[in-house]
Amino acid sequence: MIFDPLYMGILVVALFLSGSVSLLVKTRFSAGQKVRIQSGLCGADVARAILADAGITDVTVQETHGFLSDHYNPLNKTLNLSREVYHGVNASAAGVAAHEVGHAIQHAKGYAPMWLRSFLVPVANLGSNLGPWIVIIGIIVMGAYSATLGHEIAVVGVVLFACATLFTLVTVPVEFDASARAKKILARLSIVQPGREYNTVSGVLLAAGLTYVAAAITAILQLLYWAHKAGLLGGRSND
């Protein structure tokens, strides 16, 4: 399948989208690091201040390794901030830290899309890893043994990959909601000032959110491709 022109075209689009967005994130994050916030709070302080304001007392803020490896872990209720964010006293650090606290707030308030995303994790991992291979096996069975059996096998693969695609789609509103919460709280608590500070935070968070949009677009294109190969779109395919 990797030499299929259609599949190669999807790979090119995926690489272009991910590469462009990744460059945008790095560029805006780097620019935001040069905008020192007047409140003088580092990322860790920002996170703790917002958690306190939200009345969340059971989440631990800690430093983690890796560039932009920031994440909230709902399983052990830890807010993990990369070194640049944990210690940074700038718009980028404040924005990313607040965004991750946004996820903690979603968790505390039972934000439905976040719970749906967590529920989809196991089947999404299975679908993204095994789905395409099951479709390929189905196509081989179509051509060598039984068109009906092969088609049924391929459909199973498509369904599994659809679950992975659904995961990427659900992730988009989860991430943008966390960013919206972050910007609102940063402004309300005067952690960032109107104007340059707030606009820089918005730019950084928008760029970060676009990475999930790019992932969702790629997943949809791949799902359509595998559905086509399974014969669900445009007739059966056994090539």
Image (cartoon, rainbow, N blue to C red):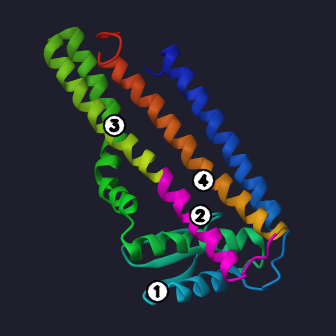
Q: Secondary structure at mark 2?
A: helix
Residue bearing mark 4: 209
The alpha-carbon separation of the residues under discs 3 and 1 comes to 35 Å
Q: Residues within 10 Å of mark 4 (few under 14, many from 20)?
A: many
Which label's residue is closer to the chain start, 3 or 2? 3
At x 57%, y 33%, the residue is 14
The alpha-carbon separation of the residues under discs 4 and 1 comes to 25 Å
At x 31%, y 23%, the residue is 136
Residue bearing mark 1: 56
Residue bearing mark 2: 180
Q: Secondary structure at mark 4?
A: helix
Discs 3/1, front: 1
Q: Of the residues shown, which amino acid type is indicated by label 2?
A: Ala
Q: Of the residues shown, which amino acid type is indicated by label 3?
A: Ala
Q: Of the residues shown, which amino acid type is indicated by label 1?
A: Ile
The alpha-carbon separation of the residues under discs 4 and 2 comes to 11 Å
Q: Residues within 10 Å of mark 2 (few under 14, many from 20)?
A: some
